[in-house]
Image: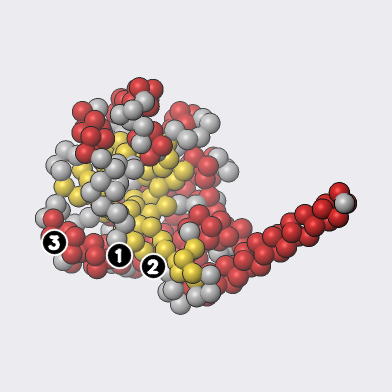
């Protein structure tokens, strides 16, 4: 009886592993095709400058609806892109598409910059900085309008090459942001080494800002530290007016979150900017 149950569990496990492997292969093949055929789309989430109360920039968020599997989360297909060697092609597509959309906004009077995420695979490619700059310029945009975000987890794969890549991107006119600050194991050490301009406080600290004294103290300490280093402080995950007001009181520079806007496609973004008049 016990052996029978054990075999049954093994069969179920084998089936689940098979299904996961099949799904992953389907995503990999579909992603390669999706990048080539512009099947992917970008949503944009506005970012508020707290000194002016206006929208100063955007974050580009890649979205993909697979023809068979439906909507796939970026956390899943970006991981597949990393492992399958598609991350360079995906990253190139995001930079090119973001640059074109930003230029489109500029032509309509909305002078906003846009942040895009850098993966570990991109940063370890020695050709990435020059290729990124060329992609931005080919779209008709100056590099200063594209901000590159890097996470600690992406940086630690090879700190020397990561620092070199970020320095080159920065020398070309782009700002560099450290994303998800506070979630790694050696944040201060990375902050000391990486040539960053912006520190993004992870939303996990912001969500408990008003209820948890320790979260409040950590956020205040991070803001003070960042300002002492001459960095811009950007808080993510703002969902209430009270959170926003608290961050203003602590001297935070930029905000992003559902409180004033969810991510939107380009047409919705244009309408939102025109209706709110916040840019």
Above-or-below relation of 30 to 203: below
Q: Position of residue 105 (x, y in %)?
A: 21, 64
Q: Secondary structure at mark 2?
A: strand
Q: Is residue 69 left or right of residue 216?
A: right
Q: Residue at x 80, y 57 (%)?
A: 8
Q: Earlier in the sequence, mark 2 or mark 1?
A: 2
Mark 2 touching mark 1, by CB under 8 A? Answer: yes
Residue 82: quarter of image: bottom right
Q: Secondary structure at mark 1?
A: loop
Bin the neighbour count of mark 2 within 10 Å (Cα to Cα): few under 14, some 14-19, many 20 and up. Answer: some
Q: Which mark is residue 158?
A: none
Above-or-below relation of 132 to 31: above
Q: Position of residue 205 (x, y in %)?
A: 39, 33
Q: Residue at x 15, y 43 (%)?
A: 53
Which of 203 and 178 lies nearest the eye of the viewer? 203
Q: Give the CA separation, mark 3 to mark 2.
A: 22 Å
Bin the neighbour count of mark 1 within 10 Å (Cα to Cα): few under 14, some 14-19, many 20 and up. Answer: some
Q: Give the CA separation, mark 2 to mark 1.
A: 8 Å
**Residue 269 in view here:** yes
Q: Give the CA separation, mark 3 to mark 1.
A: 14 Å
Q: Earlier in the sequence, mark 3 or mark 2?
A: 2
Which of 133 and 112 lies nearest the eye of the viewer? 112
Q: Which residue is mark 2?
A: 41
Q: Residue at x 46, y 43 (%)?
A: 151
Q: Which mark is residue 265?
A: 1
């Amino acid at each position: 009886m016990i052996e029978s149950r054990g075999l049954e569990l093994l069969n179920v496990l084998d089936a689940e592993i098979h299904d996961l492997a099949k799904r992953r292969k389907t995503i990999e093949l579909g992603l390669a095709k999706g990048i080539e055929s512009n099947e992917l789309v970008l949503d944009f989430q506005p970012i508020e400058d707290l000194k002016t109360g206006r929208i100063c920039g955007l974050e580009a968020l890649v979205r993909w609806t697979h023809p068979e599997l439906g909507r796939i989360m970026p956390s899943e297909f970006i991981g597949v892109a990393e492992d399958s060697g598609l991350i360079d092609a995906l990253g190139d597509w995001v930079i090119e598409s973001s640059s074109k959309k930003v230029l489109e906004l500029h032509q309509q009077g909305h002078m906003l910059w846009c942040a895009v995420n850098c993966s570990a695979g991109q940063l370890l490619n020695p050709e990435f900085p020059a290729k990124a700059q060329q992609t931005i310029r080919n779209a008709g945009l100056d590099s200063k309008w594209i901000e590159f975000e890097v996470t600690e987890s992406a940086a630690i794969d090879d700190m020397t090459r990561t620092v070199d890549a970020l320095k080159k991107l920065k020398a070309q006119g782009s700002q560099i942001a450290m994303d998800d600050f506070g979630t790694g194991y050696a944040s201060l050490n990375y902050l000391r080494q990486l040539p960053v301009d912006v520190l993004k406080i992870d939303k996990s600290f912001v969500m408990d800002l008003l209820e948890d004294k320790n979260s409040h103290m950590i956020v205040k300490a991070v803001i003070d530290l960042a300002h002492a280093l001459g960095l811009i402080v950007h808080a993510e995950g703002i969902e209430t007016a009270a959170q926003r007001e608290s961050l203003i009181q602590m001297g935070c520079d930029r905000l992003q979150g559902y409180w004033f806007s969810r991510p939107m496609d380009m047409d919705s973004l244009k309408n939102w900017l025109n209706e709110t008049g916040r840019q």
